Image: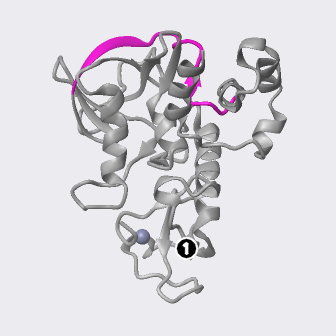
Amino acid sequence: MGGCLSAVDNAVNDFIDKESRYYKESNNAKDYAKNEQNSGSHAAAVLSSELSPVYPSLPKGAKQFHCKNVYDGDTLTLANGDRVRLLGIDTPELKEKQAFALEAKEYTKRYCHGKDIWLSFDDNNSDNNKDHYGRLLAFIWVPMNGKQWLCINEGLVASGLAHAYSPSKSKKIHNYDKMLALQRIARKHSKGQWKSYKDFSVIVTPNGSAFHKCKRKGKAESDCKHLSRSKHLNVIQASDAYDRGCHPCRNCLG
Ligand SMILES: [Zn+2]
């Protein structure tokens, strides 16, 4: 049992600690910890909490595929030639040599490259689960210990190797709030790309899903072309913008 749990420990990358309020608040975790087999294991308690990226079963409708190649943290190809973009996240860009891009790729590669993986979609009944590049937008699942399932999308965010990402404010993925909570915890614990993170002032608009660079520190002025028609600019901290589910503007903060 010990070896088994330490494997899972690695998988969730120790993203949450015993002092976290999520640990204390989770009744599931308490119940699980009562189980003699798992007593004393922090990982066991966390893994049964609602915020764990490891699940006891696959979601309904998940389908098995073979992963041929992993390009970067959030893109891979299936043996049938289909390309897949991991849903709800954004990993650092390899070609732009962004920090932790390699680590994000390694994470996805470790679990998926040349292996059987399972895909689920935000709407399993829809025929259209593709983006405008023709890539399947999916959650990726891999087996752990033969009886649990790791959601790679959530695991990347929990490990600080991806940002939670919702391209549209109107249509949210089903686990969006969980993704934001995982991101907040990763930031709090300085995991992955949050390691050297320092907060800074950014500009947001009431309905925009991106946050933008301040032309002058702390001032609601911007040179970004995406804001040329926006009247209501507000200055907030980037951490608050992330917590709201906003992502850095690709034009001015890319
Ligand atoms: Zn911008």
Is ligand 1 less than 8 Å from the beta carbon at label 1?
yes
**As displayed, is residue 176 above or below residue 231?**
above
Residue 120 can be seen in this image: no
Please state the horizontal and vertical placement of residue 24, each as a whole percent of the image. 83, 37
Taking 198 as reference, is 96 left or right?
A: left
Amino acid bearing label 1 = Ile
Q: What residue is pinned by disc 1?
A: 203
Relative depth, front residue between 78 and 188: 188
Magenta region includes residue 54: yes
Question: Taking the image as four quarters, which one is ligand 1 found in?
Answer: bottom left
Residue 182 in view in this figure? yes
Is residue 85 covered in magenta?
no
Say which residue appears at 80% left-offset and 44% top-offset: 21
Helix, strand or loop at mark 1: strand
Name the quadrant of the N terminus.
top right
Q: Is residue 150 above or below residue 72?
A: above
Location of residue 66 in the rendering, given as x and y in whole percent from the top left corner: 25, 16
Residue extent of the magenta highlight: 50-68
Give percent across and percent down for residue 41. 70, 27
User: Which residue is pictured at 59% across the width and 20% down the height?
Assistant: 2
